[in-house]
Amino acid sequence: MSAPVLYDVVDRVATITLHRPDVRNAFGQGMGPALDDAYRRADSDDDVRAVVLTGTPPAFCAGADMTSGGDTFSAQGSTFSAAAVEFPAWKVRKPVIAAVNGHAVGIGFTITLHADIRIMAADAKYGIVQARRGVMGDGYSHWTLPRLVGTERAASILLTGRFFDGLEAKELGMCSQVLPNDEVLPAALELARDIAVNTAPLSVAYSKRLLWQSFELDAARVEQLETQYHHPLMGSADAKEGVLAFLERREPQWQGRVTRDWQGD
């Protein structure tokens, strides 16, 4: 049996691929722990500057593995968690881009909401359909989705369990780009490579952390954290290099390392 999640690094971009193509990458057979491990691996590797999450065609992720039929959502013990992964994409201190290159349903869609940026296939089928299966949205969807689209639009997705396509997803504010299926992954990789070359790793790490923290903070606390995070950045070698590279019209050579220099929580 092949691994349910593939991991590959090229040009400082880690590509994480959901890989159960015989069942349209249904979420099962250890996919959750494998995805968790892949995110932790990317977070702890300074040679990785950006991450792309995608699925082996013909789908991104068909949702829960229903091969057990009516027992798919059987009662679970006290250790059960609806989180899908213990270390979600927003904890990775590098940008995570979801290249949603095909159908993404249920947990297969809610894990895309953990990413920082989503690029979605125009004609694929999406939905958080769990209410139509006798359960409810999972994977932090009641936290991530309202913050992307607002409470009323989130309700129209979570409480109806209806399907929608990529064009509607963009209209609702769920993604930044909608492209033909076969253009989604190349576009995500191009964006990831641009980030890997042109942005300072520590600057991105602090900015990402504050973006995800900001939902629970007031303006005064955001200002405090922006100031706190600026202290290890200003006066650093990368702060000098970023300006010189711009003035000299060349690619920057960053020296900061997240695993060594990180001073966040």
Image: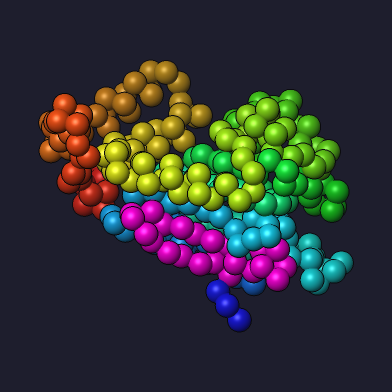
Question: Is 252 above or below relative to 153?
Answer: below
Question: Is 11 above or below relative to 90?
Answer: below
Toward the viewer: 171 or 34?
A: 171
Residue depicted at 78% across the width and 32% down the height: 156
In the picture as drawn, the residue positioned furthest to the top comes out as 220
Q: Quadrant of residue 234?
A: top left
**Residue 197 picture location, percent across and down:** 29, 44
Residue depicted at 51% across the width and 39% down the height: 117
**Residue 150 picture location, percent across and down:** 66, 26
In the picture as drawn, the residue positioned furthest to the bottom comes out as 1
The range drawn in magenta is 4-26
**Residue 17 picture location, percent across and down:** 54, 61
Q: Is residue 78 left or right of residue 215?
A: right
Is residue 22 a member of the stretch shown in magenta?
Answer: yes
Count of residue discs: 0
Residue depicted at 28% across the width and 55% down the height: 46
Residue depicted at 70% across the width and 71% down the height: 22
- The color scheme shown is rainbow
